[in-house]
Image (spheres, helix red, strand yellow):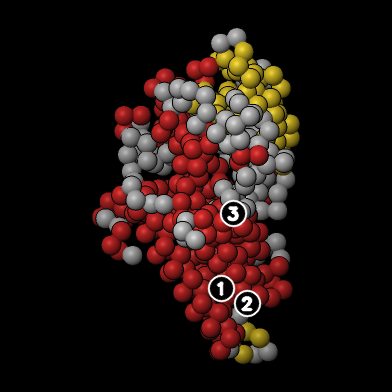
Amino acid sequence: MEIYFKEEHEIFRKTIQSFIEKEILPLVDEAEEKEKFPVELFPKMGSQGFLCIRVPKTYGGRDGDKIMECIAIEELTKGSSGITSAFTTHGGLATDPILRFGSEDQKQRYLVPAVKGEKIGAFGLTEPDAGSDAASLRATAEKRLGGYLINGTKTFITNGPICHYVIVAAYTDVTKKGSGINLFIVDRENPGFSVVKKLTKLGHRSTETGELSFDDCWVPKEQMIGDQEGGGFNQIEYTLRSGRISTGARCIGLARSILEESMYYVRNAKKQGRMVGRSQSVRFSLAEMAMYLDVMKAITYRCAWLYDCGKVTMKDAAIVKLFCTETLCKMAYDGLRLQGGEAYLNSNLMQRLLRDSRLHRIPEGTSEIQHLLIFNELGI
């Protein structure tokens, strides 16, 4: 593992660990209970250079690499997977398309304030009838009066209720499945854009998720990402490839917490007057958890390194997401099983780790989609 980390990475890890302990951990319990994200964290994160880590210094970013971004995500998730959801959406899905494909004007108006935490971004892809199959989305963007009229509904949108802008995927040409999609930057105050409702969830309760509506929402043509109609599907694929690696880092953070909580319990718990840790089955479970965690780290940071080298493939990213998310869920259930009824109580961290773990198998392509992506690159 050490071959992927430079001295600057280790210094960065210690810096963000200190920030998390001081600024984030004291807010987690209340945010989870009230299901309300502490928005004051955005400018605090921005002032430390922890948002949009890979953005060049030209736009106020840290100019870090994918490995550094994964370190940040891993440590943040260990503190709170829910709160991390808001940051990873903002620093990835809601800014990567602007950084990689946006105009200079879009970068100045959206990317620069996003890096500072002055504007919160969201990404509008999922719809009530279209999720993992992005080509099946129904939102449309009809060319009109020097701009586009956007119509459609987006759901399960992280940061939706608190965002200042959302990147919306919509068809500019419905006759071209997939290839007729474009991405648009829509400001919250745009007429026709509304937050229909805030969604309550099983896990990740400290991040805010919403359903968004676009009813003849007009945006000027300058808000389209890219200089021509079409091409949005490729922009989405590029963005999701990076996001799947980030999901691996999130799984590492949660897996570390699961292993730590399990070890703490085993060290201190007794059943029928006998220390739990003396049981061979318990020892085997902990050994497997440690093994899974090491494998997660190895494949995630290898993939992050490949990304930085410009060599990562869709298959590489899909393997990371599939293995890490499925294995994480197994670890979470094993952690719950080790503690028995105690882990089922709301006062026990393990039940939250279980709830938060389950989500990662769904966004940015379900486990079934990852299987297909891997198979398609086998050359059969």
Front label number (2 vs 3) = 3
Q: Are marks 2 and 3 in contact (CB under 8 Å)?
A: no
Q: Amino acid at mark 1?
A: Ser
Q: Quadrant of residue 34?
A: top right
Q: Are marks 2 and 1 in contact (CB under 8 Å)?
A: yes
Eyeballing the image, is 348 above or below 124? Answer: below
Front-lying residue, 155 or 148: 148
**Which residue is most to the left?**
7
Front-lying residue, 4 or 178: 178
Evaluate whether residue 248 shows in this view.
no
Front label number (3 vs 1) = 3
Q: CA distance from mark 3 to mark 1?
A: 31 Å
Q: Is residue 243 left or right of residue 308?
A: right
Q: For the residue labelled by badge 1, is the local secondary structure a helix, a strand or a loop?
A: helix
> Mark 2 vs mark 1: which is more N-terminal?
1
Q: Amino acid at mark 3?
A: Ile
**Which residue is most to the front?**
380
User: To which residue does mark 2 refer?
Assistant: 338
Mark identifier at residue 369: 3
Q: For the residue labelled by badge 2, is the local secondary structure a helix, a strand or a loop?
A: helix
Task: Provide residue 141's location: percent of width, then percent of height.
Answer: 62, 23
Q: For the residue labelled by badge 3, is the local secondary structure a helix, a strand or a loop?
A: helix
Q: CA distance from mark 2 to mark 3?
A: 31 Å
Which residue occupies 53% across, 17% down? 221
Task: Provide residue 67's location: percent of width, then percent of height.
Answer: 36, 52
Evaluate whether residue 242 shows in this view.
yes
Which residue occupies 70% across, 36% down? 211
CA neighbours of label 1 inside 10 A, class few (<14), some (14 to 19), many (20+):
many
Q: Amino acid at mark 2?
A: Leu
User: To which residue does mark 1 refer?
Assistant: 262
Task: Provide residue 17's location: percent of width, then percent of height.
Answer: 41, 53
